[in-house]
Image (cartoon, grey):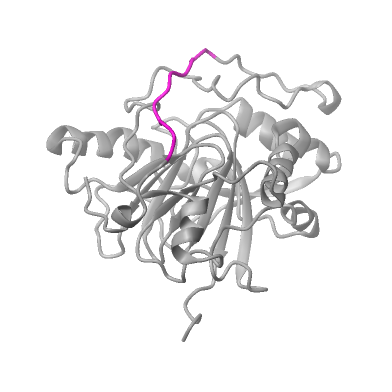
Amino acid sequence: SRNIPFAILVPDMSPPRSRPRSWTLAIAIAITPRALFSFEPKSNNDTELSPKWRWNLDVTRCNITRISYSDLIAHHGSAGLPPLYHEPLVVYDDSSTSTSRARRRTKFHAATSCSNLVEAFPSGFEVTLTSSNSLSERRKVMPLADYVREHVLATEVMPDSKSNETWYLFGETYTEKWKALLDGYVLPPCQTCEIEGATALAFGIGGVGSGVQWHVHGPGFSESVHGRKHWVLYPPKKTVAEFHKDNSSRAWMEETYMDMVRAEGEDGRSLPWECTLEEGEMIYFPDMWWHATINLDRYTVFVSSFTTEHNIGQ
């Protein structure tokens, strides 16, 4: 475990995190005309397309401070988290369902469901995909409906999948149509988020086992709007053990991570900061921290808010 002083000021008041999940075998989806195809998965619990993973998806470590939205506001003030906060935080929402903020979040959640999202864009609407390796250097254009059908609902990224050959929708969502959708997103509670032009939003969709290999960039937040997403992080000066930029993040988690656990135990000092975001939770990732992500459910939607914090208060 980690010595996290902030946890003393704001104790974890989140609901119990271990609960049983049912796992069933999903049937491969045939490509059918748009009008005849159901884009809504029966359940995001129907995620296991392959034999059980080497690490337990239901009872996972979370050594990052978890704080409710209301406690964060109470501790830092109504403006939210200060710029360049020093460590990761997981924020879960506990606001009343009657508030304007909660109603907007519910509306955005509905708008980004699998069927509603596809139907919200014109038939044949194209998206730009990137490779899911560390550098995201490859690009591919294809219809949104085809991406959801072929790369999300009917595909599982396996440990031996090459991330430079795995396509991912994330970050290339800056057109006017995407901006219209993201206008309904509720920004994270941070002091720079409400400053005009200081936050860039990026929308993403992924399937089981997908994610991005270890990489670094500036600070921000990422929310799991649909489905669960596992995050692993290291501070900037830490060396990430045995990763190749073109291997999948799932391969690192199932192989390198599990080897570290066997060698050092669950509290090994070389293990990463980590937590699984449940649906509706968000993480703050500090400036230039190494991180990798793995989507755990069949349909995972996430929004990242990249913040500009370096010049605030100087």
Residue 114, position as x, y percentages in the image: 70, 33
Total marks drawn? Answer: 0
Magenta span: 14-25
With 305 as the anchor, is 215 left or right in this view? Answer: left
* Quadrant where the N terminus is found in the figure: top left
Residue 163 in percent (x, y) is at: 46, 43
In the rendered image, the vertical position of residue 84 relative to residue 282, given as above or below: below
Quarter of the view holding residue 191: bottom right
Please determine whether, in this image, residue 219 is positioned above or below residue 148: below
Could you tell me which residue is drawn at 57 percent across and 59 percent down? 305
Q: Is residue 158 above or below residue 219?
A: above
Q: Which residue is at the front of the view, 244 or 289?
A: 289
> Could you say where residue 43 lies in the image, as x and y percent from the top left?
61, 21
Q: Is residue 298 left or right of residue 236?
A: right
The one of 251 and 84 positioned closer to us in this rendering: 84
Q: Nearer the viewer, residue 61 or 242?
A: 61
Residue beneath the point at 86% across and 25% down: 35
Q: Which quadrant holds residue 153?
A: top right
Please identify the residue farthest to the bottom as the structure is shown. Answer: 314
Q: Estimate the x, y position of residue 184 in percent, counting from the top left.
A: 74, 52
- Which is the main secondary structure of the residues drawn in magenta? loop
Would you say residue 133 is visible in this rendering? Answer: no
Let me know if residue 44 is in the magenta part.
Answer: no
Outermost residue to the left: 263
> Residue drawn at (49%, 15%), measured in percent from left and top?
22
